[in-house]
Image: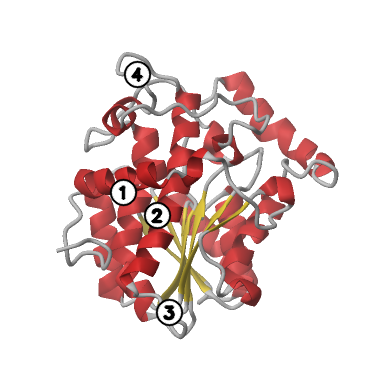
Amino acid sequence: MDRNAALVTGGNSGIGFECARQLAREGWHVLIASRNREMSADAVRRIAHESGDDAASEMGLDLGSVASVRRFAGEIAGKNVPLRALVCNAGLQVMKGPRHSPDGFELTFAVNHLGHFLLTNLLLARLLANAPARIVIVASGVHDPKLRTAMPKPSITDLETLAKTGGPRKDAFDGRLAYVNSKLCNLWFAYELGRRIEAAGVSTDGRRLAVNAFDPGLVPGSGLARDYPPVLRFVWFRILPGLARLLTPVVAGINPASKAGPALARLVLDPTLARVSGKYFPSHTRWREAPSSDASYDVARARALWEESVRMTHLLPGESPLVAR
């Protein structure tokens, strides 16, 4: 493979597909990682039709399974992929639950945070070897209680309870809250990852690895509504996407996938961002750098989440340059 390679999780639909499509248009080889291999193969065909046969490929990945993430990272190593970008985009919202991953974690937390945490750490050495490289973690404005999002405000007590129920209580489940909490975890992870990369001294001027977070805004038609009741699914997939195209010129927080996806790709492509790391690019500023919520900068909680994630995924010294021996 001669092209620079970018891995996009959940790149077979929605903003992930539009991001992958834009990267391929710019000459990158895009590797689409998803659990739905049929949809991924179709996405590859569509991208190849536009950008050439070597523009895209796909691999199977279940972010909810620690074993699947480890197998996937091993396959990447076996293929010797020249990876220079990782876009942690895939996510889900579960309405009825709690549902648990094969490893016993609440599924929203397992997919939206834990799987990406493990995947990133297992691929860090490869990204550093091909640096300059970039990691982009897709978060959401719903993590910020100061914004009016029609979603619950984040509520996290201890991390053990979060990992079991997605919320602050052991005896209750709220799928919308589990999603919001997972998006706060995305910010904690992004900022802590950036801090640890800098502290370890593995990112240098000549071989820089940048880490940033992205908020796509409200993107109707995305796969997040898969678990909604039938009427809401119809509105989400059939009515709201057209409305988003009409509203996006005047409402910055509402965007069709065709607009949010290229904005996400920009965090990989834009040469002016090559030395920008540890920043947040939200939709309400039309993806100009801006602060995230006050809680997202809680260093102690971010450190605790990192350490618990290492334990939960059984990440070992030698598997990541950021895990101490």
- The residue nearer to you, when weighing 31 against 172, is 172
Residue 324 picture location, percent across and down? 19, 62
- Whether label 4 touches label 2, CB < 8 Å: no
Say which of marks 4 and 3 sits in front: 4
Quarter location, residue 51: bottom right
Q: Residues within 10 Å of mark 2 (few under 14, many from 20)?
A: many
Give how far across and how far down residue 27 sits, in percent.
59, 78
Name the kind of residue labelled 2 in the image: Glu
**Residue bearing the label numbered 3:** 131
Of labels 3 and 2, the one closer to you: 2
Q: Which residue is mark 4?
A: 169
Rendered residue at 34%/74% (across/down): 201
The local secondary structure at tag 2 comes to: helix
Q: CA distance from mark 1 to mark 2?
A: 7 Å
The circle drawn on residue 192 is 2
How far apart are the two marked residues, 1 and 3, measured between alpha carbons? 23 Å
Task: Classify 10 Å Cα crowding around label 3: few (below 14), some (14-19), many (20 and above).
Answer: many
Q: Position of residue 109 (x, y in %)?
A: 37, 37
Q: Earlier in the sequence, mark 1 or mark 2?
A: 2
**Upstream in the sequence, badge 3 or badge 2?**
3
Which residue bears the numbered disc 1? Answer: 306
Secondary structure of the residue carrying tag 1 is helix
Residue 27 in view (yes/no): yes
Instruction: Determine the residue positioned at 16% across, 58% down.
Output: 316
Residue type at mark 3? Ala
Q: Earlier in the sequence, mark 1 or mark 4?
A: 4
Q: Residue at x 39, y 58 (%)?
A: 193
